[in-house]
Amino acid sequence: MPSLFEGYCYSTTQEAADADLSRGLIAVDTGLLGGVAVTNISGTTADLTFNYQPFAGGLPVIVSITRAYPSCSSVGYHHNYSGLTLSDVVEVSWMVVLVWASAWAIKSMRARG
């Protein structure tokens, strides 16, 4: 199932999770997270394991996070992804055209009468 992560639709949830882990070190409030592994992929969710290193020193801690990736329609970059398909857009566009045509027709009939 295609999965969306940071504006790119990956072919599988595994690929999206791998891209998530490959971001390098992530700064959080009190330390850094570094990706370690992806486990337990189910549908559009994956369990990610990170190594947390506190800024103040101390021992690193292993942190597990379950992340849900939104589904997407086609592989590739999706800027401003709204979830609308082309058929949805065409249908709404025709409805707008019909509203404008109806308004024009009513205006024309009122001008003649």
Image (cartoon, rainbow, N blue to C red):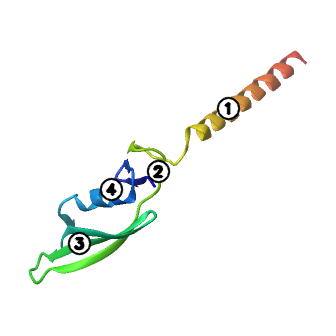
Residue at the extreme left of the image, as rendered: 57
CA separation in Å, label 3 and label 4? 17 Å
Question: Which residue occupies the foreground of this view, 97 or 19?
Answer: 19
Report crowding for label 2: few under 14, some 14 to 19, many 20 or more residues within 10 A (C-alpha). many
- What secondary structure is marked by label 4? helix
Visible residue check, residue 26: yes
* Picture residue at 40% right of the left edge, 43% below the top: 79
Of badges 2 and 1, the one in the foreground is 2
- What secondary structure is marked by label 3? strand
- Residue 94, which numbered label? 1
- Residue 15, which numbered label? 4
CA separation in Å, label 2 and label 3? 26 Å
Task: Choose the circle earlier in sequence order: 3 or 1.
Answer: 3
Task: Choose the circle earlier in sequence order: 2 or 4.
Answer: 4
Of badges 2 and 4, the one in the foreground is 4
Residue 7 x %, y %: 36, 48
